[in-house]
């Protein structure tokens, strides 16, 4: 079953269970997926759906930071709840240790030695961790490994 089919199935389940907050988030996600499909004029594959979910999750995380900074904890809690619903459609996230080991392995294989090779290493690591780790965390880990 594709991720998109799972989202549609979960929408029906949330509707029947009367889970309004979860249903709202799932509808938002389906809407974003449909807009992306209209832009591309085709159905999205699972990787593209994961990209949409990742984008929405990142937007919510930014909103949580802004709401917390603005002392709007009620809105921050709502966004946090939406993040939890969205995370169900993302692949399992890598831990920092797993990510560090993967980056070290890729650095050894590609011959990346210093900060000048960061772009080269990011091109190797990026596709391997797509959807499994936040881009900022990956970049910070690559910098740390290259710095020694």
Image: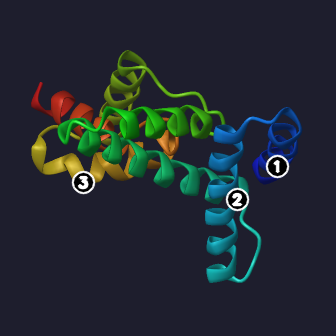
Q: Quadrant of residue 84?
A: top right
Q: Marks 2/3: CA distance? A: 34 Å
- Provide the residue designation for mark 3: 119
Q: Position of residue 58 (x, y in %)?
A: 41, 47
Q: Position of residue 119 (x, y in %)?
A: 24, 54
- Provide the residue designation for mark 1: 2
Tell me, yes or no, whether the two marked residues, 1 and 2, touch with CB atoms within 8 Å.
no
Between 7 and 48, the one lying in front of the other is 7
Q: Quadrant of residue 29?
A: bottom right
Which label sits on residue 24?
none
Q: Marks 1/2: CA distance? A: 13 Å
Between 24 and 58, the one lying in front of the other is 24
Q: Residue at x 70, y 59 (%)?
A: 30
Q: Is residue 81 visible?
A: yes
- Secondary structure of the residue carrying numbered label 2: helix
Q: Position of residue 146 (x, y in %)?
A: 16, 33
Tell me, yes or no, whether the two marked residues, 2 and 3, touch with CB atoms within 8 Å.
no
Circle 1 or circle 2, nearest the eye:
2
Circle 2 or circle 3, nearest the eye:
2
Which label sits on residue 30?
2
Q: Residues within 10 Å of mark 1 (few under 14, many from 20)?
A: few
User: Relative to residue 93, is residue 100 drawn left or right?
Assistant: left
Q: Residues within 10 Å of mark 2 (few under 14, many from 20)?
A: some
Q: Residue at x 57, y 50 (%)?
A: 53
Q: Quadrant of the C terminus?
A: top left
Q: Quadrant of residue 104?
A: top left
Q: Residues within 10 Å of mark 3 (few under 14, many from 20)?
A: few
N-terminal label among 2 and 3: 2
Between 130 and 90, the one lying in front of the other is 90
């Amino acid at each position: 079953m594709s991720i998109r089919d799972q989202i549609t199935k979960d929408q029906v389940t949330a509707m029947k269970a009367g889970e309004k907050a979860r249903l709202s988030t799932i509808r938002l996600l389906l809407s974003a997926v449909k807009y992306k499909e209209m832009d591309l004029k085709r159905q999205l594959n699972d990787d593209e759906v994961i990209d949409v979910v990742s984008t929405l999750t990142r937007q919510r995380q930014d909103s949580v930071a802004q709401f917390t900074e603005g002392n709007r904890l009620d809105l921050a809690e709502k966004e946090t709840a939406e993040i939890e619903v969205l995370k169900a459609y993302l692949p399992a996230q890598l831990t920092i240790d797993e990510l560090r080991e993967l980056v070290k392995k890729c650095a050894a294989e590609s011959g990346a030695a210093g900060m000048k090779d960061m772009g080269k290493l990011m091109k190797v690591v990026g596709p391997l961790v797509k959807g499994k780790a936040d881009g900022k965390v990956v970049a910070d880990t690559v910098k740390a490994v290259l710095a020694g």
